[in-house]
Amino acid sequence: MSAVLPAVVKRGAIRIDDVVKVYGSGETAVPAVDHCSLSIEAGEICMIVGPSGCGKTTLLNAIAGFHSISSGRIALDGETLCDAARPLAEPGSDRIVVFQNGALFPWKTNLENVAFGPIVQGKLARAEALERARELLAGAGLSGVEDSYPGELSSGMRRRVEIVRALMNEPKVLLLDEPFRALDALTKSVMHQALLEIYYRNKVTIVFITHDLDEAVLLGDKVVVMTSRPAQVKRVIPIDIPHPRNVSLVTTKRFRELLEEARLAVHEEARKSFASGEKEG
């Protein structure tokens, strides 16, 4: 597939204003997010990095509507998703999550998996949904796997099918929680290029949590470094490498400079997290 620069995007802008999340209350209260503010532009790939257990996934789940917030506000395209008056955002097809662990139906073909959502929601007739699913699979380099089952695909191809299934709902925002964490280095490299190609074709805002700093710099328009728990924005690193991109840029001087900048910022917070006894999570 040849890369095409994304067109101007006018939807999918996220604004996080002074968000706080505390689990429990009283002596058992655990602060997870502490007065966190962040702007993510429409059509941007925003990579979020930080120590394990710092609150990255809590923030992503608040955007998705899986976790409530204690105070603050999260908005999508200027419309409030959640705030003090409505702490839990309503989940919707405008925000689709792809988790670490796959969720394809093993008894359905890959084509049926991709078409499933719009059919069940009544958004598309079955024939129309299957046609659209076939087009999206082809656009993601997955022609030929439509009639096979998830268990017959490699781990990387299954991940691609999951991302295509998410895009079937035409979301404003794609929320990715370490989707490539379990992949080997070679497969992950292939998936990086595949995700960029999908992004160039579908022009969707992406919020991507990762521990892989190479991945963050390669894919992101900006890298947001979070503090150790409770999560705040420590630093936002603009990635001034033009699109379209491919994996060859990892050998460039600018890539190495940006990678070192991110590494130093994360390392400082990782040391704090280790000293305080934070665990993986």
Image (cartoon, rainbow, N blue to C red):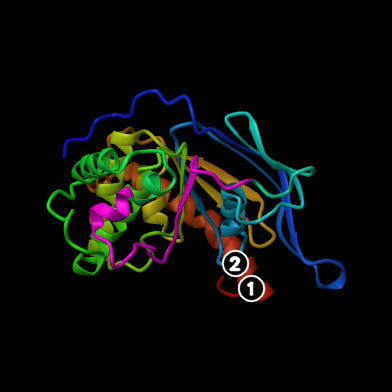
Determine the secondary structure under disc 1. Answer: loop
Indicate the position of residue 119 as horizontal and vertical percent values: 37, 46
- Residue picked out by circle 2: 53
In the displayed structure, would residue 213 be above or below residue 6?
below
The magenta stretch is: 90-115
Determine the secondary structure under disc 2. Answer: loop
Of the numbered discs 2 and 1, the one sitting upstream in the chain is 2
Q: Residues within 10 Å of mark 1 (few under 14, many from 20)?
A: some
Indicate the position of residue 58 as horizontal and vertical percent values: 61, 58
Q: Residues within 10 Å of mark 2 (few under 14, many from 20)?
A: some
Would you say residue 257 is visible in this rendering? no
Indicate the position of residue 174 as horizontal and vertical percent values: 44, 45
Q: Quadrant of residue 219?
A: top left
**Residue at (58, 54) in percent of width and height:** 61
Q: Quadrant of residue 153?
A: bottom left
Q: What quarter of the picture does the C terminus occupy?
A: bottom right
Q: Is residue 192 left or right of residue 85?
A: left
Estimate the spatial distance between the alpha carbons at disc 2 and disc 1, rounded to whole Å.
7 Å
- Residue picked out by circle 1: 278
Magenta-span inclusion, residue 68 = no
Indicate the position of residue 245 as horizontal and vertical percent values: 27, 39
Q: Nearer the viewer, mark 2 or mark 1?
A: 2
| Front residue of this view, candidates 261 and 172 | 172
Q: Is residue 97 left or right of residue 254?
A: right
The amino acid at mark 2 is: Gly
**Residue at (80, 67) in percent of width and height:** 29
Would you say residue 277 is visible in this rendering? yes
The amino acid at mark 1 is: Glu
Magenta-span inclusion, residue 112 = yes
